[in-house]
Amino acid sequence: MNTPFYIARRYLFAKKSTNAINIISTISVAGVFVGSAALIIILSVFNGFEEVVLKMFNTITPQIVISPVQGKTFDPNTPYFNKLRKEKGVYSFTEVLAENALLRYNDKQSVGLVKGVSTDYLKNKSLDSITIDGNFTLENKSLNYAVIGSAIQTFLMVNTTDPFNPLQVFSPKKKASSVSSVNPADDFTILSIPVSGVFEVQQDFDNVAIVPLRFARKLLEEPVRISSIEINLERGVDADQFKANIEEHIGQNFEIKDRIQQNKVLYNILGSEKWAVYIILTFILIIAIFNIIGSLTMLVIDKLKDIAILSSLGAGKKLIKRIFLLEGMMITMAGCVFGLIVGLGFCLLQQRFGLVKMTQDNLVITNAYPVALKWKDFLLVFLTVSVFSFMASALSSNLSVKKINHLNQDL
C-alpha cells in the first residue's frame, strides 16, 4: 500500500488531540460540499433555460438558410436547387420572399417585416406551441391569411376574431411613376389580408407578419425570385454534414447559415451568462476550499511528534509533505464528491417533480425551473475543485517541511 496515502487516511479518521481541528475540517468539507452542489445545480438550471429558449427559437428558425451574398433576391429555378429540393433527408424546403412594409389596422400603422413562405413552412409541427392567439393558418381554400408577431399585434391592436376588418399592407411599387402623383397611395401596392393568429417568440421575431408566398409575390411584384431558402432535415440527418455538402456544390454566390450562425448573438449571450455565473460561484468555492489551509496547519502542529518519529525512521521531506498534501485533497474531494451526488439527486428530482416553481410573471413556458444535466459540467466542477484543492493543500503541506527543519535544528 502507498505509505503516504495510508498515513493520510488514518489521520483523516483518527481522533485529534484538539477538537478545533475536527471542527475546522468539518467546516471545510461542508463549504466544499455546499459550493459543489450549488455550482452543479445552477449550471444545470442554466442548461435547462438554454434548452427552453433555443427550443422556442428553433421553432421559428430553420436548420439551414440559403441566401444570396449580393443583392436581396435570387432565382430558385436552377438545376441544383431543384435537385436539392428532392434531396434525401430534406424534411421541408421553404421558399421565402421577405421585405419591410407598412402595416395598417384601423387608425394605427407600423413598419414590419412581411415574410412570404411556401407551403412547406407549415410542416413545422411546433408552430402551434408559439401561437398565443388564434390559429397558425396561412391558407384556407383560396383565401390568404396572415399570422403576425405579438409586437405587431400589441401596437396595432389587431383583433383576430374580426374577419371583416383585415390588415392592410403597403409596399412601394417597383415601377412607380417619376412624376409626382396627386394621390401618394398610387405609388404603393396596397393589399388587405385577414389575420388568423398571433405568435410570440422574442422581440426580434415578433415584428414579423408571415403570409403565403403568393400574397408576398403580388405585394412585392416579384413573380419568380425569392429572398432565401429555409431547409429543415429529417431526424437523424447530420445538419453540419448537410450544410458542408451544400457549400461544396453551391458556389460562392450564396451564404449558408446554420442555427448557431443565424442566432449568433443569442448563443453568445447564453454562453457568456453561464460562464459568468460559473466564475462567480467558483470564487465562492475557492474561499471554501482554502479553509483547508487552517485545518492542515493545525493538523501539522498536532502531529509534530509523528513527524519527528517518521523523520527519525528515515522518512524524507517529500514523503511527509505528500502525507499532508493527500490529507488536504481527501478532505476537499470528499466534500466535492458528496456535493456532486446531492446536486445530481436534486436535479433529477427537479426534472421529475418540478420541486421549485417559477413566479407566474415569468414568461418561460414551463411553470417549474427547467434543468438539463450535462456530464461536462460535472467534470468541470470536479476539475475545478481538484485544482484549487491541490493548490491549497500544497501550501499547507509546505509547513510540515518547515517543521522538520525546525526539529532538525533543535536536535
Image (cartoon, rainbow, N blue to C red):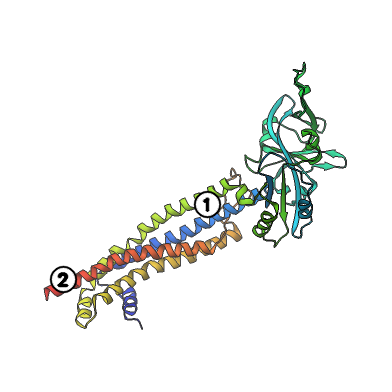
Where's residue 303, x and y in %?
Answer: 23, 73
Specify few, some or many for label 1: CA neighbours under 10 Å numbering under 14, 14-19, or 20 or more: some
Where's residue 106, x and y in %?
Answer: 75, 26
Residue at x-position 22% and y-position 76%:
307
Q: Residue furthest right?
A: 141
Numbered badge on residue 406: 2
Left or right: 259 as drawn, with respect to 120: left
Does residue 214 lie above or below 397 as drawn?
above
Q: Secondary structure at mark 1?
A: helix
- On the image, which quarter does residue 141 sit in? top right
Residue at x-position 37% and y-position 62%:
388
In 3D space, how far apart are the residues under numbered discs 1 and 2 (Cα atoms)?
Answer: 51 Å
Numbered badge on residue 271: 1
Left or right: 122 as drawn, with respect to 392: right
Q: Secondary structure at mark 2?
A: helix
Where's residue 407, x and y in %?
Answer: 16, 73
Q: Is residue 366 visible?
A: no
Q: Residue furthest top?
A: 182
Which residue is more in the foreground, 19 or 186? 186
Left or right: 195 as drawn, with respect to 64: right
Specify the quadrant that holds the N terminus: bottom left
The type of residue carrying mark 2 is: His
